Image (tube, rainbow, N blue to C red):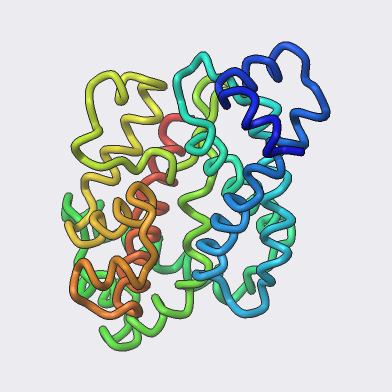
Amino acid sequence: MATSLFEQKTEEELWIEYGKTKSPQLRDAFIRQYMPLVKYVAGKVSAGMPGSVEFDDLVGFGQFGLLDAINKYDPAKNVKFKTYAVTRIRGAIFDELRHLDWVPRSVRQKSRAIEDAIVSVEAKLGRPATDEEISNEMGLSIAEYHKTVMKVSGTSVLSLNDVWYSGDENDSMSIGDSIESPTCMNPDAIVEREEVRRVIIEAINELPEKEKMVLVLYYHEDLTFREIGQVLQVSESRISQLHTKANLRLRAKLTNIRKGIM
């Protein structure tokens, strides 16, 4: 039983043993121990997805990420397994969603139009674009622009799970992995995988304050949209809108930057 193994030894001892033996019994014990984490991550992802995306499918996708995390985890790196696994689980879910190509073409086009408008306006002004400036660039009223943002809100989260590589494919991170509380942005953290991490953090820091706060609370503090709404004293739908706009801004900035450094 998984519980008996965890009762007999500390988790750290079990990880060291698994690293040496790759025991199928230990692997299965870890899978049982951390399946609730897969369901938790799948639940968070499903909250931002259209109704056509089934929760059980997300759990299934996440199981691949858990297994990958178990096989690759190195306790010597002093990162808690839960922290490491969440990234792998979430990444596996979004990888499968991308392969399914579930986002309608019309929604992709709307998302790209907003990103292009952001790039264009910010290139001219040298600062973050306001909603009014973006809507003007697109030839839309502010109300039409907000409607367009809400239409892509269920899909824009994919942008923060795009993988960026630093040097080789074994050293990768997603944009979402680089969102940290400002108090955690110490020099040692920034130096790690320096160039890619630097441009991601710069892009995040250039976001309007409320949008940046939503990303930090969602990805770093692990709050739901409803909980973030309570913290910021606004509606859940307003948090969804801020989250979407932050994602679109980041994707626009980082796509441009990636073109320049690749």
- Of 60 and 174, the residue lying toward us: 60
The residue lying at 37 percent from left, 24 percent from top is 195
- The image shows residue 262, relative to residue 76, as above or below, that is below
Left or right: where 117 falls relative to 19: left
- Of 162 and 47, the residue lying toward us: 47
> Residue 182 at x, y = what percent?
20, 40
The residue lying at 27 percent from left, 72 percent from top is 229
Q: Quadrant of residue 97?
A: bottom right
The residue lying at 68 percent from left, 58 percent from top is 59
Is residue 119 at all visible to an observer of this figure?
no
Left or right: where 96 falls relative to 161: right
- Of 165 and 122, the residue lying toward us: 165
> Residue 191 at x, y = what percent?
32, 19
**Quadrant (top left/top right/bottom left/bottom right) for the N terminus:** top right
- Of 182 and 174, the residue lying toward us: 182
Q: Quadrant of residue 4?
A: top right
Q: Residue furthest right?
A: 24
Is residue 148 at all visible to an observer of this figure?
yes
The residue lying at 72 percent from left, 11 percent from top is 20
> Residue 200 at x, y = what percent?
35, 38
- The image shows residue 111, relative to residue 217, as above or below, that is below
Q: Quadrant of residue 16?
A: top right
- The image shows residue 244, relative to residue 191, as above or below, that is below
> Residue 179 at x, y = what percent?
34, 43
